[in-house]
Structure formats: C-alpha cells, structure tokens
Amino acid sequence: MSEKIFIFDSTLRDGEQTPGARLNREEKLELARQLARLGVDIIEAGFPISSPGELKAVQEIARQVKGPVICALARAVKGDIDAAWEAIKEAERPRLHVFLGASDIHMKYKLRKDPELLLEQAVEAVKYARRFADDVEYSPEDATRAREEYLCRVIEGAIKAGATVINIPDTVGYAVPEEFGALIRRLREKVPGAEKVIFSVHCHNDLGLAVANSLAAIENGARQVECNINGIGERAGNAALEEIVVALRIRQDHYPYHTDINFGEIYRTSRLVSKLTGIRIPVNKAVVGINAFAHSSGIHQDGVLKDKRTYEIIDADLIGGKAAQMFLTARSGRHAVKNQLQQLGYTLTEEQLESLYHRFVELADKKKEIFPEDLEALVFDHIFAAEPVYRLDYLQTVSGSRSIPSAVIRLKCADDSIIQEVAVGSGPIDAAYNAINKIVGLNIKLENYQLNAVTKGRDALGEVAVKISYQNKTILGRGTSTDIVEASVKAYLDGVNKLLKINGYNNYNNG
Ligand code: KIV
Ligand code: ZN
C-alpha cells in the first residue's frame, strides 16, 4: 500500500481571507459538510479570536461536522489559544494550530521582538495548547525566508513542547520547487525529533508555484499538504486542493502516494465554493475550469472523437464533472431535471423540485439550452436564498443616449404590502439601486460589481455579484437573469436582504 498524504483544507480560513469572500455561519457550515463529503482529512474551520461570529461558526462546525479533524488557528498567545479551544473542544477530533513569525523580516518589523524571546514564546504557546489538545500543529510563519539555523531551533523547540504536526508555510509564495523540496528534506534530516511528527506544507501562489512546491515537498517527505478549493486565498491564493490531489492520482506512476479524497465530489465542491464566495472559476482553471474538458480545435475534436485519450488525461467522470457536460432543453421533463440536479449533488424535496421546475420552464422558454451552471444558478437563486425581507415585484428602467437614466422599483414586503419608488442615476442600474436605497431607508454603498455570463451564447444567463457595505459590514449579493438589469437588481436585493437579517431588521423601512 502506498503512503498516505493527508489533505488539510484551509478554504474556510486562509481561503476566506480572500478579499470579498466572507461567508456567514450557515454558508460555512454548508461548505464544511461538503468538505467532509469530499473526504479531506483536516478542516481548518477558522480563526476564532478574530470575532465572536467566527468563534460561533467554528463551534458549530466542530459540533456538527463528523469525520475530518476540525482545526482552529491561533497566534502564539494565550487569548488566541483559549478562543480556538473554546471553538473546537466539542469536535470528535480537535486540533489547535499555533503560528508565530520566524523570518527576520517578520520578527523585526511585524513582531518587533527579539528572536530568542519569540522562540520561547513559540515553545510556551505549544505547551499551553497541549494542555487542551492532544493534536497541536505548529507553523513558523514565513519559514521560507527565515534563517535555517533559527528555523531548525524553533521546530526543535515546538516538537519538544509537544507539537504533533510541523507545518512549513511559504507565506509569501517565495519558494521555488527544487529549493523548497530540499528545505523540507534537510529539516526532516537535521531537526532532532523530526521523525516523531508529521511534516506539512502550506504554499501560497504569488509566483504561480504553490502546487508545484507542494508536490516537491511531498517528494521530500511532507505527508500533509495545506490547500484550498479553487486555490482561493490571500493575494494570489493558496495551492489548489483539486490540482494537488488530481496530479497525485493521474501521475501515480511518478508519485507513489494516495489520498482519501472522494474524487467524484471535486467538481461539486468547486462549484459550491465559487457560488458561496462569489469568486468565479477561471474558464481555463486546471481540473475544474469549464473549458478543462472542452475541445475546440478541429484536430483535437477529431482526435477525442476517435479516442478520448488523444487529448484528455483527466476523465470528467473522475471529478464528478460528467454532469457538467450535459444540457437540458424546454422538452426535458421533471425527471430529467431531478436527475441532473442529483448528478450535480443537489437533493431537493418534492416541493422544492416543483418550484424549481417552474423556474426551469420559464428559463427554458428564453434560452434554448439549459446547462448545469444555469440549473445551479436557479437552485441558488430560488431554493438556497435566505428568506427575503423584500422581493422584487416590478422593475422598469429607462436609459438611452438622450434620456436621464431612471428606474421604477416595486418591492413586496414580508407582510405582502407593496412599496414603490422612483429614482434617477448615472445609468439604469445605478438608478435602480438608488430606488432600492430609498425604499429600505438605508444609505447602502456599492463597493464592487461583477457581471458574468453563466454559460456561453447570446441567450446566456447573466450572473451579477455585488459587494455592498453599510456601516462596518460588507455583504455579497448574487442574482441571475437573462436580463442583466434584472440580474443586477436581484443581486443588490439579495445583499440588502442579507444585510437586514444580519442587522436584525426584520421589518421593512425601519432605517
Ligand atoms: O501563510 C501562512 O503563513 C499562514 C499560516 C497561519 C500557516 O497562513
Ligand atoms: Zn497562508
């Protein structure tokens, strides 16, 4: 039997540090459940000291998600460790992850402390964490830019203090594969006690080398890799989970290791992360991009039709992506829709299915082919959307080269009453947003607006993701429609409804 590589997923922690990717508690729980279905070994559920809401979300995951180890991050200080333990103590298998800067740059400019004092702090923090948890991971932050002699002493101290996993972070994505692999090998050979712990790596993608560095580390003895779905994360992101596990699988001839990942869940998990965070998957993204299995040149198409192996090394079926290649039409019945949904991983109640089917028929009237992405968009818009405070009842906009852009918006409130407003703006969407702001009586700011076509073609669904802010809260809203103004209004309203819920405004127009 080949050696196992432990997959440590940090989508909910480092991934969530992606600008604009904040998730609420229900979304985190939903993703954690899907990560468990995917078969990751460890879920890093969050950084509990960062806010009471974060602590609660991690706590909920620890209570409800069974299977993987549930890990929480803490700086090497008591308060952080206390909060992290509070969050995960009810998990089946809790792990505390403690980190502290180890490079001169971090110690001198960020931490502003003497390296020897910081070494002591690291050791004390690991000892303190071990009072609570049997499983403690230690990360010397910015390890790849640290002095090796110092790094070795920190790791030795952490192991003696009881760390069970030593993680080597390439915090700023500075390493290159050969050098990083060699570093892992030397650390394992040189540090006293190294044989007692699992070596892990955590690679950022600033130079586009995160996956290559992770694989090089595995070849040099790392047995845990930290990675995120779709490679999301700080700056250029972290190593992409799906790329690492599929590379290990497809190139088994080169990598004599295995993981316990359920490959058939990869596609679904990737789509879920994209939907929840609002971060689109690039069409050419390795493994999960929509074009990863598309062949457009004649020569390639001809080859694939004769034998798929001519131009395809990954079977879409392996990652649960077969469903992604099929489409439905107006003639598809309930059974076909249900079947497609199941293949995409959505099991709906009969009532939900009935409601979704009506939306499907409406959409199929406007659009010839309904792709899985369209169906998913309907699920998210109509089934998974939070119970709204306001629903869009009517929308009319005016725009043109000689007219002042204006919008009439009519919203239906929770008690079925109707409120209507008219506003002008710099364009029809801006006018519609101004009208909504008038109705809800809040000065909500639009921070970011993104429009994408869900699939190809002139009749494609438009998907809008907006980031709106009010006071200190920033919220992501999403909406889809074949009409981009309507998609924009739905997205804004989705964000407004979430905002009202978070702020505890259950009534409308209460400022
Ligand atoms: O990039 C990094 O160094 C981290 C640590 C907390 C592991 O995310
Ligand atoms: Zn990181």
Image: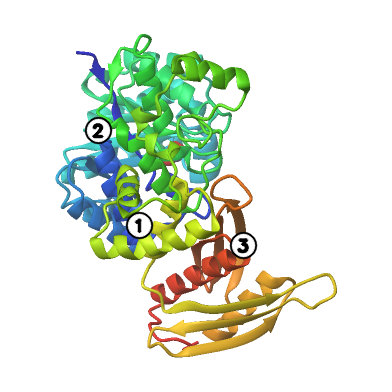
**Residue drawn at (59%, 85%), measured in percent from left and top?**
438
How far across and how far down the image is residue 311, in percent?
51, 17
Residue occupying the point 45% across, 73% down: 497
* Secondary element type, mark 1: helix
**Relative to 352, residue 203 above or below:** above
Q: Earlier in the sequence, mark 2 or mark 3?
A: 2
Residue bearing mark 3: 484
Task: Name the residue that disc number 2 marks.
Answer: 163
- Which amino acid, by three-letter code, is at mark 3? Ile
Disc nearer the start of the sequence (2/1): 1
* Picture quadrant of residue 288: top left
Query: What amino acid type should be assigned to the residue bearing mark 2?
Result: Ala
Please indicate, yes or no, whether residue 117 appears anywhere in the rendered image: no
Drawn side of residue 294 relative to residue 85, left or right: right
Discs 2/3, front:
3
Farthest residue toward the front? 331
Q: Which residue is mark 1?
A: 27
Quadrant for the N terminus in the image: top left
Q: Position of residue 490 (x, y in %)?
A: 52, 68
User: What is the secondary structure assignment of the residue under circle 2?
Assistant: loop
Asked which quadrant contains residue 105, the reply is top right
C-alpha span from label 2 to label 1: 31 Å
Mark 1 to mark 3 CA distance (whole Å): 26 Å
Give percent across and percent down for residue 406.
71, 79
Q: How many marks?
A: 3
Q: Residue at x 29, y 24 (%)?
A: 5
